[in-house]
Structure formats: structure tokens, C-alpha cells
Amino acid sequence: MKRKLQMKTKAEETKPFVGNVNIVPVDTLRTKSGALRSLARILGEAEAMPVALEATDRPLDSGFRISGTDLSLSIASKLNISGIYDGSFSQNERAYFLDAAAYIDKYREDSIAPGVMAMTRWGVGFRVAMRASDIQGGLKLSYATVAAAVDLGLAKARYEIIGVGIGIDVLVKILKNVSLAGQLNGENFFKLANDVPKIIAEYIEANKAGLVAQPMAAGIVRDLDSDRIETARSIFFAMYCLSKPWPLKTALERAMATLDKDLIRFTYAMIAGNIPETQTPDSDAEEKADKWLKTS
């Protein structure tokens, strides 16, 4: 008898850590070697190889689940998941994700060292990538509360729907009354979190034979969203450059490859304001940076 695909209607928020594993969303695309493109430049291709599925694995029979998580925009941009995370960003912006898919998690069985991929999530479904800014500052948003904050005028957000194992042409065809990208609000978030998952679950159930599970998330034995040493060095370098004072363009040119250039840009924006990269920071920014260096 054919088993019907089950769907959990209540969204479960993915915690940043499961044991010692940090779960992050990834792009389904891979490099020529087979490594996950999202993680290859962070971990190196050798450590970004997905944990393979076995012949007996059946991701599409695992049930349809909805989960959500969030990351800093700096990390989301590095993972190259969606174009909405490109460009500059401000202090109050963050990346949020809602994943709805039939999937299974495959864990490595050998010993795991820090920085190594311990798990790969294989599935078929869709992802909503959201970029939200907290207008007033101080809000503790989650993927589930972003839209409510927007409707209350406390935040601004935009979104993009990304297929996981489902092509853009199929999404356009089956999601007739849903825009695949745009400004987020309470009305369209309700569709994204309730109506769209039901449509996608039904599509998967009817088309299992022709669908292939893709890597959609990975478990890393490292917190990509709070690499304290790298963060500290990048901020210190930015403050040093501001104290000179050097234009942002000069700072970026002199930054070592290991430093986070997005974080350097962010630090400049916070201290010197949104000035052109070639403009020298004013004396006020220079004084703030110098004071920070002397007290740190």
C-alpha cells in the first residue's frame, strides 16, 4: 500500500547547536569535486564533502517538516545561499530562514575534529530566505516573528523562495498566487508558512519517482556565526585603520585574507557612517577609534 507523505504543521525552530554540531543552511550546488559550494571556501573542499546517502535511505518517505533558523548577514553572504544577502549591511540586520522539506540527516561515523562537517541534511522542498532589519534596535526576532514585527512597523524585511530539489520553473507553475520574491508582511508570511508547505508536500507525494534529494543543510563542529578570534581580529584591524585615519578602500586593500572584510565594512559604517570607500573618515571617527584601541 502506498504510504502517504506526512506533514508536520507546527514549525520547529532549529537550534544553533545540536550537541556540538552547528546546523547551517547551504546552497544545493556543488563544486567540480563534489564539495558543497557554500562551505568549500570556508572549510576547504576536502572538509566540505557531504556525508553521502546510502542506497537504503529514503529521504522523501521521512515526512514533511518545517523548521527555521537565523544567521548573521556576514555568514549568510559567505554561504552564498541567496542574492538578497549580497551587498552592504547594517548593525540591525539579520538573515532568517524557513525550511519546509522531506529530509533525513546523515551523520559521519568516524571521529570528528573542529571545523569538520559532521552531518549533511538531504531533502526535497523549499526554503524561504529572509533579510530583516530591526528599525528601533533591541528586538529579539526569530524567523517566526519577523512578519509580525513588520506589520507593527518595528522591522522591514524581504524574502526569496528557493527550491530544494525542485526547479524554479516548477515553483512558478505550482505556486500560482505566491510571488517568489518581494517585501515580507504578515499576509504573505502566512502563505509561506502554511499554504505553500501544503502545496509542496502534495507535489512531492505525487512526483516522488522523479525527485532527487539534495544537500540543504550541514552540521559543522564549529560555530560559524560567532568565530570570536576572527571577529576580534577583524574589528581590531578596522579600528586601527580608522585611527590612522585611512579610507575604507585602503583598509580593505591592506587586510589579510583571513580577516572578515564584510565585518571591516560594517565597523567602518558604525564608526564613520555610510561614507564612500575612498573618503577619509572625519576627526570624530578617528577619535572614537583611537579611544577604543586605548581601552581595549
Image (cartoon, grey):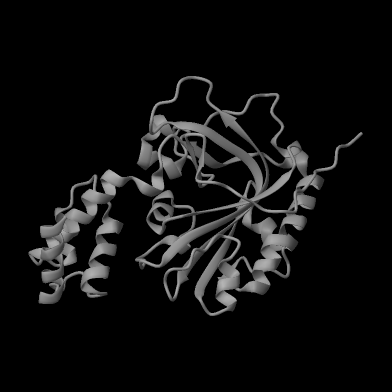
Res 199 → quadrant: bottom right
Left or right of 78, for residue 61 = right
Res 175 → quadrant: bottom right
How many marks the image carries: the answer is 0
Q: Is residue 149 above or below residue 212?
A: below
Left or right of 231, for residue 182 = right
Q: Position of residue 264 (x, y in %)?
A: 24, 59
Q: Quadrant of the N terminus?
A: top right
- Which residue sits furthest top? 110
- Give the residue at x 73% y 41%: 210
- Which residue sits furthest bottom? 153
- Which residue sits furthest front? 295
Left or right of 114, for residue 131 = right
Q: Position of residue 169 (x, y in %)?
A: 66, 58
Left or right of 111, for residue 5 = right
Q: Quadrant of the C terminus?
A: bottom left
- Give the residue at x 47% y 68%: 139
Is residue 245 among the parts visible in the rendering?
A: yes
